[in-house]
Image (spheres, grey):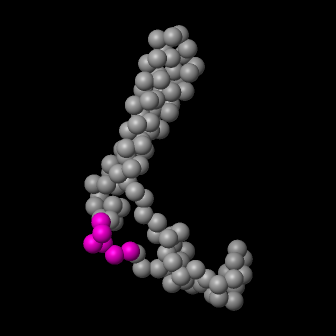
Amino acid sequence: MPMRTGNEPLQARSPLKIRCGLALWGLLWAVAGTVAFADFGRPEWAAACAALAMVAAADLFMVIRHIRQGPHYQPGKDVPPYEPDRGRNDAFGIRSDPNRRRGSRP
């Protein structure tokens, strides 16, 4: 099986503005659900919606943080794509060996 030449799986970039909008939309619906279920006397569903609102708020916080960190997380058209890994796994200091089977230990 030939090795991939692209870097998409390792260096994919997220469309953060769309994700921000979806997180905000989910947060608004979850808060509305919490209020509605609390008014109708359904505390279990209100708690579930409140938990979902907290998850959406945390996601919204992280997306806004990444947007503010600049082009590393939100690149524009003038930012070139990342360089491919070229067989180096810096996190573990392991050099890829073409003769080694995938999934086996070094």
Residue drawn at x 53%, y 82% is 5
| 14 and 101: which is toward the camera | 14
From the viewer's perspective, is 79 left or right of 4?
A: left
Image vertical order of residue 63 relative to residue 96, above or below: above
On the image, the x and y values in percent for residue 85 come to 49, 79
Residue 57 in view, yes or no? no
Left or right: 101 in relation to 69: right
Based on the picture, tell me whether residue 41 belongs to the magenta stretch. no
Name the image quarter holding residue 106: bottom right
Q: Residue at x 42, y 63 (%)?
A: 13
Q: Magenta part of the protein: which range?
A: 76-81
Q: Residue 57, percent across and down? A: 40, 38
Q: Is residue 4 visible?
A: yes
Give the quadrant of the N terminus: bottom right
Question: Residue 78: within the magenta?
Answer: yes
Quick check: 78 left or right of 93? left
**105, above or below 45, in the image:** below
Residue 105 is situated, as x and y percent measured from the top left of the image, at 70, 77
Identified at 56% across, 21% down, the residue is 45
